[in-house]
Image (cartoon, rainbow, N blue to C red):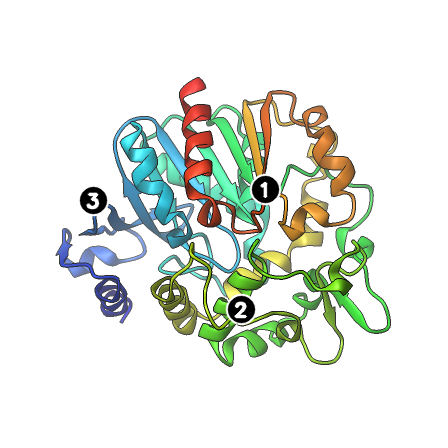
């Protein structure tokens, strides 16, 4: 069923050719399976990495660059980067991350820690026979990229974080520090209880994705009650997450209905549980990363975010971002994009591509 669904998704995106390069029996979990398609020179295949089956979108030849997406997205969030970086002389790989899209979705919540996610990226390099790579991450993909750089500087020679900066390990469990009051709780706390957010988001995956992408963008109007850091990211205890988002009549220029169709099709098929399980390991990540307390990211780095990204308004970001070089001593630049919201590489593709290519060529 997975193969037919994959073909249907590609057909919906206007793919004209589908080539199966290995027999169906090769798609057993114990062996690498490869499914490739041609879509404007982007190739798609399934590989094994770190014990899971992982779907890749890739393009180009040259030094390896790995692109890690966030929530609620897929490889498709890098659609504007694959060709640009490939044309600049790089082998670009954008996986569906663990829990998303065509990649495996382990059932157990504890199988979504940062150690698993970084392990997936190291396993991907091994599968591709790559000694090293530059790793780039957006949203939740950014902590994966930062921690890959932190833990394995022998395998990752450069790191780019979009939206989310490297955050050193704190002194207390993260969920104990998240805001809540009688009326609302921080959205990451809302995501903790399995099944709650899934039920809300999966009632109408297309509306969920459409509203989330617009509401966190630089094009969405900012409500007055979002003006202070205390109210950013808060979910009403009565009503749920989607009561605070906007579903626009017309999408902004950087986002099309076809884009929404692709994302919605993926989440209608897979559900949202895999991505939400990343949030359910926030405290567990804090526990298992204790050996890295005080460690710094030592490889060359770049950080980019939009000045209208709600993440940069979270508590403590006004202190962390200006002082990021203390924790990332080879930070080359911090770039803030005027008018850009959370979906950095989608909202400002040209600027992001130019900054990435400049950074990659400097390594």
Q: Are marks 3 and 2 in contact (CB under 8 Å)?
A: no
Residue 342 visible? The answer is yes
Between disc 3 and disc 2, the foreground one is 2
Residue closest to the far right: 182
Who is closer to the viewer here, 174 or 70?
Answer: 70
Q: Secondary structure at mark 3?
A: loop
Q: Which residue is mark 3?
A: 41
Q: Quadrant of the N terminus?
A: bottom left
Q: Quadrant of the C terminus?
A: top left
Mark 3 crowdedness (10 Å alpha carbons): few <14, some 14-19, many ≥20: few
Alpha-carbon distance for marks 2 and 1?
22 Å
Q: Is residue 282 above or below residue 349?
A: below
Q: Which residue is mark 2?
A: 211
- Which comes sooner in the sequence, label 2 or label 1? 2
x, y percent for residue 194: 62, 71
Alpha-carbon distance for marks 3 and 2?
31 Å
Residue displayed at 42% across by 58% down: 255
Q: For residue 338, which numbered disc appears in the image?
A: 1
x, y percent for residue 198: 56, 73
- Which comes sooner in the sequence, label 3 or label 2? 3
Who is closer to the viewer here, 266 or 262?
Answer: 262
x, y percent for residue 185: 77, 67
Left or right: residue 64 versus residue 148 is left
Q: Secondary structure at mark 1?
A: loop
Alpha-carbon distance for marks 1 and 3?
32 Å
Who is closer to the viewer here, 306 or 149?
Answer: 306
């Amino acid at each position: 069923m997975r193969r037919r669904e994959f073909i249907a998704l590609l057909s919906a995106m206007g793919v004209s050719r589908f080539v199966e390069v290995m027999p169906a029996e090769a798609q057993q979990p114990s062996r690498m399976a490869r499914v490739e398609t041609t879509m404007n020179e982007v190739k798609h295949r399934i590989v094994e990495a770190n014990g899971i089956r992982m779907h890749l979108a890739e393009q180009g030849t040259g030094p390896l660059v790995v692109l890690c997406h966030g929530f609620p997205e897929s490889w498709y969030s890098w659609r504007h980067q694959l060709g640009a970086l490939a044309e600049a002389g790089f082998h670009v790989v954008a996986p569906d991350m663990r829990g998303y899209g065509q990649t495996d979705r382990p059932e157990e919540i504890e199988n979504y820690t940062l150690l698993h996610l970084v392990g997936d990226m190291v396993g991907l390099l091994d599968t591709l026979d790559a000694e090293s790579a530059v790793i780039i991450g957006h949203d939740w993909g950014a902590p994966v990229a930062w921690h890959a750089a932190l833990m394995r500087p022998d395998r990752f020679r450069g790191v780019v974080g979009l939206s989310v900066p490297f955050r050193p390990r704190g002194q207390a469990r993260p969920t104990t520090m998240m805001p809540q009051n009688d009326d609302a709780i921080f959205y990451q706390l809302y995501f903790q209880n399995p099944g709650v957010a899934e039920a809300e988001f999966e009632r109408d995956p297309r509306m969920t994705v459409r509203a989330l992408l617009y509401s966190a963008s630089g094009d969405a109007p900012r409500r007055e009650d979002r003006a202070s850091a205390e109210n950013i990211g808060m979910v009403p205890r009565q009503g749920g997450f989607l009561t605070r988002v906007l579903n626009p009549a017309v999408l902004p220029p950087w986002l099309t209905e076809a884009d929404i169709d692709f994302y919605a099709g993926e989440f209608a098929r897979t559900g949202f549980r895999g991505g939400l399980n990343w949030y359910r390991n926030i405290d567990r990540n804090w526990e298992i990363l204790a050996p890295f307390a005080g460690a710094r990211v030592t490889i060359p780095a770049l950080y980019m975010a939009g000045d209208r990204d709600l993440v940069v308004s979270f508590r403590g970001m006004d202190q962390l971002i200006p002082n990021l070089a203390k924790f990332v001593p080879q930070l080359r630049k911090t770039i803030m994009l005027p008018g850009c919201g959370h979906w950095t590489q989608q909202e400002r593709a040209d600027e992001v591509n130019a900054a990435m290519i400049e950074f990659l060529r400097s390594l």
